Each structure stands twice: as C-alpha cells, then as structure tokens.
C-alpha cells in the first residue's frame, strides 16, 4: 500500500478541524469517519495527533476542537449573495470535472465553506460538494502526480515524468509546466508546457503520467507565451496555428438549442439560404479531434458540410451505425415513418 504523503495528512487534519468546528457539541469518531470518508483507524491517528498539538480534545466518546485554537482560526470571506452563488457554481463544476477523489480540492472546498459568512445559504452546499468529491474512487498514484505537477507549476520547478501515451510505450521526459487546463471531455486535466525531449511545446494528459518527480531545476515561463490565449482556437484542449473551417447545418428542431450557447469564440450562425428554417453554423478550429464527438452528439439533427474529410468520416460512420442497427438509409423502424431531408443528407445520396 503506498505511503500517504505528508501534504495529504495535513489536508486531512484540516478537514478534521473544519468538521470539529461545525459540531460544537462534539462528534463521535464513527460519525466523523462517515462524514469525511476517512477510515476509522486512520482518523483516530489524526485525532490523537491533533490532541497532542493542543488542537482537539476528547470527552467520553465525543471529540471537540480546543476553544483557544478555534479562536485563532476565525477568518471570514465577505461576499455578496451573487458572488457566493458564483463560488457555489464553480465548486459544482469542479466536482463534476473530477472522476477521482482529489483531496487537495476537497480540503479547499471545506475551507471555502468555513470562510463564507452571513445568511448566504451556500456554505452547506459547498460542504456537500466536498463530500460528493470524497465519494469518488481514490487513486493515490494520481493524487501524488497531481500534487507534484501543481508544485512544479506554482514554484516554477521542472518535473521529471514517466508518460504513457495511448498505444505507445511509456517514455521519460522533463516538463516545464506553463499552463494547467481542465477538459470536460474525459473528465481530465492537461499540462501545457515545454517538454524535453523534444525541447518543444507539448500538451500532456495528467492521467497518463505514471510517475512524477519534482526537480531542483528552476525555470521561467517565456514572456511571449500567450497563456490562456493558447487555447483560443482550440475546441477543447488541442491547439495549434493552422485552423480548419467547419460548416454545419442543424435541423430546425435543435436550432434554438444550438443558439442558446456560444460554443466557440469564432462561431458564426445564420439561416440556411436555401431553407431558412435550418441553421447554419461555422467556426475556425485548430484541430477536429475533440470537435468530432460534439458533432456526433447531435445525431441526425446535424449535417457536416465542410471540410470534406469531416463529412466523409461522419458519412462512413452513419452507414456503419445503420448496419449495426439493421437499418438502411431509406428504411425506418419505430419512431418517425418518414425521413426528412436532413436525415437523407446525413446519410448521403
């Protein structure tokens, strides 16, 4: 069983303190274990450690926070109701983004909930978000990698990694993190930075790093690195200077839904000149890898007009799907009895 990092112990102690503060009448170890999703024996070690430090004490079967220590912790974050809801929504996105338990994020949410003051009624929701995050499956190796990469990014020290690309043998490299970016596709986080080898800007998926070691080698982010503007033309995370213009045509039944969201900074929308009830959508995107699943998600309610490679790929997939479900482009089985023009266009002539 991997050894728990010292930083993880401190984060768990912080969560124990936060929970004790919320239970001024005391709380049992069993209740605390369930609340924080920490194994009972491990929790007892943390509580005894806090007791030795003069931060917690036990009476009968209940644990309490030491009053003098609690007084030294009083901190408040004064925000307006609208700002508080914004923080709550941000925490919800954070939890949805993580498919693994992230104890650093979990502790941060508890601290944020403790600092919110007034009658804003979002503190408990943020604690609930933290508890939801605690229910994710634990992955100590990922937690260690996450922590090491974050430290490298914050303190500007290179990180030596073993990286395992899909379908390729793992390799070792030194990464100088310039940017950390979450992606909703695959619930993952990416590192963008200089990588040696090949001494060039690269994007690596955090979940594919097998091992990470913080080095003593300092680095500076080049002043000409554009930061988040690097992703300006990306659909999600894959960026580049060469842009591909895509043109889609959406069926009237989804046109309003498409218009509700600005999907890309470069997008343009306008009625189809030949059939104004259909919606034309275009954008210039650096790479289509992350874009294609989004197009697929609209099913037969969208037709790819350009580029031709995209149209060909989706047309081939449409035929394969028809074969899987025992259909032909001209047949129907349940649901609609007649295919409209958009469906016929999607399957091809």
Image: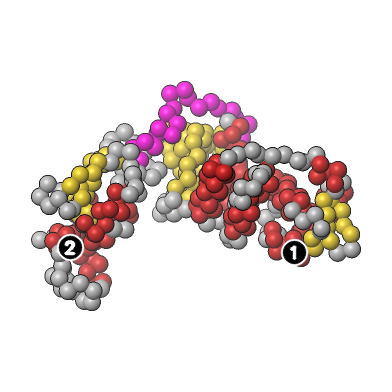
The spot of residue 304 in percent (x, y) is: 20, 52
Nearest to the observer: residue 310 or residue 295: 295
296 left or right, relative to 115: left
Q: Is residue 57 magenta?
A: no
Which type of secondary structure does the marked residue at label 1 adopt?
Answer: helix
Residue 264: x and y in percent read 33, 42
Depicted 173 relative to depicted 102: above or below? above
Q: Earlier in the sequence, mark 1 or mark 2?
A: 1
Q: Which residues are magenta?
A: 209-234
Q: Quadrant of residue 148?
A: top right
Q: CA distance from mark 1 to mark 2?
A: 56 Å
The circle on residue 343 is 2
Q: Could you tell me which residue is drawn at 17 percent across and 74 percent down?
A: 337
In this rendering, is residue 51 above or below 40?
above
Q: Quadrant of the C terminus?
A: bottom left
Q: Which mark is residue 266?
A: none
Which residue does the image show at 49% across and 33% down from the upper left? Answer: 178
Residue under pointer 1 = 31
Of helix, strand and loop, which one carries label 2? helix
Q: Position of residue 280 (x, y in %)?
A: 20, 48
- Which quarter of the rendering shows the N terminus? bottom right
Asked if the stretch drawn in magenta spans residue 214, the answer is yes
Can residue 313 be seen here? The reply is no
Mark 2 Cα shell of 10 Å, populated few (<14), some (14-19), many (≥20) = some
Image coordinates of residue 58 in percent, x first then y, are 87, 57
Toward the front, the furthest residue is: 119
Q: Is residue 181 visible?
A: yes
Identify the residue at image location x=77%, y=56%.
23
């Amino acid at each position: 069983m991997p050894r728990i990092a010292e930083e993880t112990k401190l984060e768990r102690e912080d969560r124990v303190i936060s929970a004790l503060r919320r239970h001024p009448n005391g709380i049992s170890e069993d209740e605390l274990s369930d609340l924080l999703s920490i194994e009972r024996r491990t929790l007892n070690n943390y509580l005894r450690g806090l007791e030795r430090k003069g931060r917690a004490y036990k009476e009968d079967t209940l644990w309490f926070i030491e009053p003098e220590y609690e007084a030294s912790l009083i901190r408040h974050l004064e925000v307006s109701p609208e700002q508080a809801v914004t923080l709550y929504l941000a925490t919800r996105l954070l939890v949805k983004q993580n498919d693994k338990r992230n104890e650093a994020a979990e502790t941060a949410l508890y601290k944020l909930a403790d600092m919110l003051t007034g009658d804003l009624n979002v503190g408990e929701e943020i604690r609930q978000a933290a508890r939801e995050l605690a229910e994710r499956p634990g992955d100590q190796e990922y937690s260690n990698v996450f922590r090491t990469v974050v430290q490298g990014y914050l303190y500007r020290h290179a990180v030596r990694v073993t990286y395992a690309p899909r379908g390729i043998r793992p390799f070792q490299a030194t990464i100088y993190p310039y940017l950390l970016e979450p992606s909703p596709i695959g619930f993952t986080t990416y590192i963008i930075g200089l990588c040696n080898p090949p001494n060039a800007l690269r994007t690596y998926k955090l979940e594919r790093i097998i091992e990470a070691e913080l080095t003593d080698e300092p680095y500076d982010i080049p002043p000409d690195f554009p930061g988040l503007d690097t992703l300006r033309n990306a659909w999600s995370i894959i960026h580049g200077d060469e842009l591909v213009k895509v043109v889609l045509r959406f069926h009237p039944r989804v046109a309003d839904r498409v218009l509700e969201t600005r999907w890309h900074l470069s997008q343009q929308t306008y009625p189809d000149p030949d059939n104004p009830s259909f919606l034309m959508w275009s954008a210039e995107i650096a790479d289509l890898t992350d874009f294609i699943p989004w197009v697929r998600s609209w099913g037969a309610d969208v037709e790819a007009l350009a580029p031709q490679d995209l149209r060909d790929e989706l047309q081939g997939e449409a035929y394969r799907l028809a074969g899987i479900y025992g259909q032909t482009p001209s047949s129907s089985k349940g649901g609609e009895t007649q295919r409209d023009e958009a469906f016929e266009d999607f399957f091809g002539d």
